[in-house]
Image: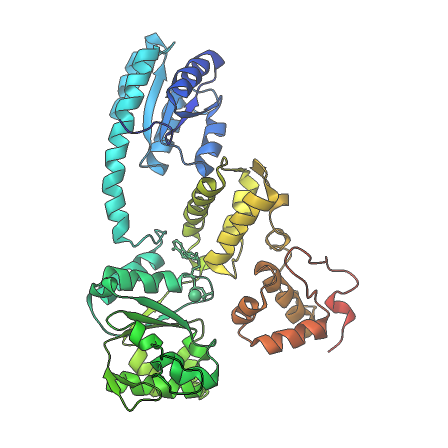
């Protein structure tokens, strides 16, 4: 029998004595048990803790029991329900089973029957999950039920069945690399390497040798020679990240390889045929970049045979809580601590926030809340300032453009935890420009967590 310890039970009853029996019996057997005395509390727990089995009284004071059970049925489809009932109410228990409850227990619950029902449900859930896991594998571990994500997954299905080049577009932190990996690992190239390359990170002088490798003795210090990214990814996939920022020199070299499907190793006359699939990603509008001549249109068309756009998180708000739950579950495992509870207002704030840094910002936010904040209950005041001031952060028609710009830059810096390279990519400006603006507006230029509140350095004091 599989261990009971990974199973979480939530017991709801307005009376403590039945709850005590459940807590002792199941707790001693290794189940993780949470008990609450009202449906309202139960709903709150369900919102943020992943519960496997609910044991509930049918007639709760604050909500009619059957409605609570229906609520659970409709909102938490893979959760099992057991009804707790007084002897004269067995009829209603039977009715609840018709509504989808697994079984019922008469109060005071018999310990043996309680445990046998739980073990039976546990085994059933394990089986059901194995099936679900197989299905999730089909969605490549990408969380989200929004139409936007469904479309992305559909496109991954198609892309993984072909060898055509793929261009993935989307704001910073939306999951472009996750999509690229999904395409690679779902296809026939999975046996070979997935090689991520950041197009902005290769110095111009090393461009050719990094991409195509060099032969023994090609230059001083060349030693025995080395393979380039294209050779390492031969048979597999080369992931060209931030392709929109690739230099024109790099674009030219890439285009040549894509046209000829061969490379020339630096320092040798040798031409090598290569079979490397290209998946490129950018947070820029690449066609617009073509129009401004910073990106070669011929290269764009070679890359964008299949185009996948990952929508920003604020355009698929229904994915926010499932993603948050996934990150919480991950950190719970890693940090070996209980998941925090979130107040209704905190949840509301999380759902309504704009998430300029998208899923990565959400992940960082949850991590900070669990490690740095380290509270059992998380309220709005524990959330980063930028999320709380969301409502204040509106365009004020009486502001100068410079003031609005300064405030926006401050908000993005705060959202990215002071990471200038991410902030600049969200803002659509290069890092140098960002640094200049930080200086010009007197914004705090400090590591994360040290942002001073608007005050003597606030943009109002600076003219432009
Ligand atoms: N739908 C999703 N389901 C699960 N995890 C996700 C999802 N989207 C993003 N993530 C996670 O969020 C983080 C950021 O994703 P990723 O690195 O793929 O974004 P990106 O678009 O490449 O960002 P950037 O433009 O900044 O490079 C990763 O940890 C990734 O696993
Ligand atoms: Mg990325």
Ligand 1 quadrant assignment: bottom left
> Which of 260/286 is in front?
260
**In which quadrant will I find the C terminus?**
bottom right
Q: Residue 313 placed where, x, y %? A: 45, 58
> Which of 134/458 is in front?
134
Indicate left or right for 42 with 105 as reference. right
Q: Residue at 30% x, 60% y: name it.
A: 182
**In which quadrant will I find the N terminus?**
top left
Instruction: State the image quarter where residue 451 is shown.
Output: bottom right
Q: Residue at 31% x, 57% y: name it.
A: 150
Q: Is residue 226 above or below residue 13?
A: below
Residue that protrudes farthest toward the bottom in the picture = 269
**Colour approach in the figure:** rainbow
Q: Residue 115 placed where, x, y %? A: 32, 17
Instruction: State the image quarter where residue 412 is shown.
Output: bottom right
Can residue 259 be seen by looking at this rendering? yes
Q: Is residue 68 above or below residue 460?
A: above
Q: Is residue 68 above or below residue 380?
A: above
Indicate left or right for 314 with 410 as reference. left
Marks counted in the figure total 0
Q: Residue at 27% x, 50% y: name it.
A: 137
Q: Residue 294 placed where, x, y %? A: 45, 86
Q: Is residue 268 above or below residue 109?
A: below
Q: Residue 19 placed where, x, y %? A: 45, 16
Indicate left or right for 164 with 87 as reference. left
Can residue 394 be seen by looking at this rendering? no
Q: Residue at 26% x, 73% y: name it.
A: 234
């Amino acid at each position: 029998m599989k261990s009971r310890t990974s199973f979480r039970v939530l017991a709801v009853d307005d009376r403590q004595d039945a709850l005590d029996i459940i807590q002792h019996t199941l707790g001693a057997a290794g189940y993780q048990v949470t008990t609450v005395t009202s449906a309202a509390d139960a709903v709150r727990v369900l919102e943020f803790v992943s519960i496997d089995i609910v044991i509930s009284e049918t007639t709760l004071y604050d909500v009619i029991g059957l409605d609570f059970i229906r609520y659970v049925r409709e909102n938490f489809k893979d959760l099992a329900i057991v009804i707790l009932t007084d002897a004269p109410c067995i009829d209603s228990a039977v009715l609840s089973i018709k509504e989808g409850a697994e079984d019922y227990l008469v109060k005071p619950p018999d310990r043996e029957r309680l445990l046998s029902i739980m073990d039976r449900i546990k085994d059933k859930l394990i089986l059901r999950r194995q099936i679900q896991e197989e299905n999730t594998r089909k969605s490549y571990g990408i969380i989200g039920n929004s139409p936007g994500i469904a479309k992305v997954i559909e496109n991954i299905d198609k892309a993984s069945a072909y060898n055509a080049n793929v261009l993935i577009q989307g704001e910073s932190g939306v999951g472009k690399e996750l999509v690229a990996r999904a395409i690679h690992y779902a296809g026939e190239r999975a046996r070979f390497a997935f090689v991520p390359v950041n197009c902005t990170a290769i110095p111009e002088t090393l461009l050719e040798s990094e991409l195509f490798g060099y032969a023994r003795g090609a230059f001083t210090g060349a030693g025995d020679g080395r393979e380039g990214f294209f050779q390492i990814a031969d048979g597999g996939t080369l992931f060209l990240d931030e392709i929109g920022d690739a230099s024109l020199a790099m674009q030219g070299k890439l285009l040549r390889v894509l046209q000829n499907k061969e490379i020339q190793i630096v320092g040798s006359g040798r031409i090598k045929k290569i079979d490397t699939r290209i998946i490129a990603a950018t947070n820029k509008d690449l066609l617009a970049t073509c129009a401004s001549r910073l990106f070669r249109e011929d290269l764009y068309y070679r890359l964008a045979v299949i185009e996948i756009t990952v929508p920003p998180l604020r355009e698929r708000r229904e994915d926010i809580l499932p993603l948050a739950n996934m990150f919480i579950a991950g950190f719970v495992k890693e940090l070996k601590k209980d998941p925090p509870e979130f107040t209704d207002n905190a949840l509301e704030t999380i759902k309504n926030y704009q998430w300029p840094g998208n899923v990565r910002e959400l992940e960082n936010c949850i991590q900070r809340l669990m490690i740095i904040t380290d509270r059992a209950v998380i309220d709005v005041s524990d959330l980063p300032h930028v999320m709380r001031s969301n409502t204040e952060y509106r365009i004020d028609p009486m502001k100068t453009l410079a003031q609005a710009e300064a405030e926006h830059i401050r908000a993005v810096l705060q959202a990215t935890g002071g990471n200038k390279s991410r902030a600049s990519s969200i803002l659509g400006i290069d890092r140098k420009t960002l640094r200049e603006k930080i200086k010009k507006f007197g914004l705090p230029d400090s590591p994360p967590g040290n942002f001073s509140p608007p005050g003597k350095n606030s943009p109002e004091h600076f003219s432009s």
